[in-house]
Image: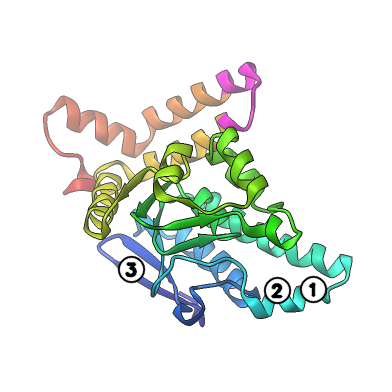
Amino acid sequence: MSSYATLKIEVAERLATVSMNRPEVRNAFHPTMIRELTLAFRELGSRKDIAAIVLKGEGKSFCSGADLGYMKAMAAFSFDENASDSEQLFEMFWAIRECPLPVIARLHGHVMGGALGLAAVCDLAAAVEGTQFCFSEVRLGLAPAVISPFVLERMASAHARRYMLTGEIFGAGEAFDSGLAQFVGDEASVDAFVLKAVAAFKFNGPEAVRATKALIRAVGETSDWTKRKSMTTQVIAERRVSEEGQEGLRGFLEKREPKWRA
């Protein structure tokens, strides 16, 4: 693994935990953190010894959005500089969304501005009761532009429209109702939910999980049923003849555990 200044990364028992580690500023991101998150998810996603990744924040909050100093610098950027900077931000979200491993966000404290993009690109998100969410961009005369395709892929459009346009703070319950979070509970129950999800990922065929995540994305990105037919029939045929698929089927028929659970 590379060395990171803004992240704490731990790998144990096939689980990688990526912790944003700037608690003094509620894990607000700036160019260094953006680059490091992009690199970390690309590196971890290429590893075969990991079954899942948990994304969390150290300290009192998950992430409060953009760092104040970063925002001050952006105010002086030219149009071209802003465009280049925004492309780097998009690449961070894209790297997490496209990570072949399942990614779980553990949300607490504050999830503000761009942090909602981080929550949206994860496959699952669990929020601690009392967590506050806000699309704060419109309050600053800006727009939640870069995060919008990722958020609209996750949240119900009526909820996203309301909160993006009003900039109002909403809670974990509303995040759950909108589809942004898949679980809400106290600290202990959120941790239990995360561990249960990780255990499920470890139980399943590792290559099958990767193939299924890619399939979900691909099917969602086309409305052409001819393409869907070709894509889905090819994937199931590949899985059936794969070494892992053959082992899983043999294990089922022989009433034994497949080798990846041994």
Magenta residues span 220-230
| Number of other residues with Cα within 10 Å of mark 3, as a class: few under 14, some 14 to 19, many 20 or more | some
Task: Check whether the beta carbons of the residues at disc 1 and disc 2 lie within 8 A of each other.
Answer: yes
The residue pinned by badge 3 equals 11
Whether 174 is drawn above or below 51: the answer is: above
* Residue 25 magenta: no
Q: Distance between the residues labelled 1 and 3?
A: 38 Å
Q: Residue at x 88, y 71 (%)?
A: 78
What SS does tag 3 mark? strand
- The residue that mark 2 highlights is 71
Q: Relative to residue 151, is residue 58 drawn left or right?
A: left
Q: How crowded is mark 2: few (under 14 residues within 10 Å), some or many (20 or more)?
A: few
Q: Where is residue 207 in the image (x, y as percent from the top left)?
A: 38, 43
Q: Which residue lies furthest to the left in this view?
A: 255
Q: Would you identify the image quadrant in which residue 28 lies?
A: bottom right
In front: mark 2 or mark 3?
2
Secondary structure beneath label 1? loop
The numbered mark at residue 184 is none
Where is residue 12 drawn, in percent x and y? 27, 67
Measuring 39% from the left and 44% from the top, which residue is drawn there?
173
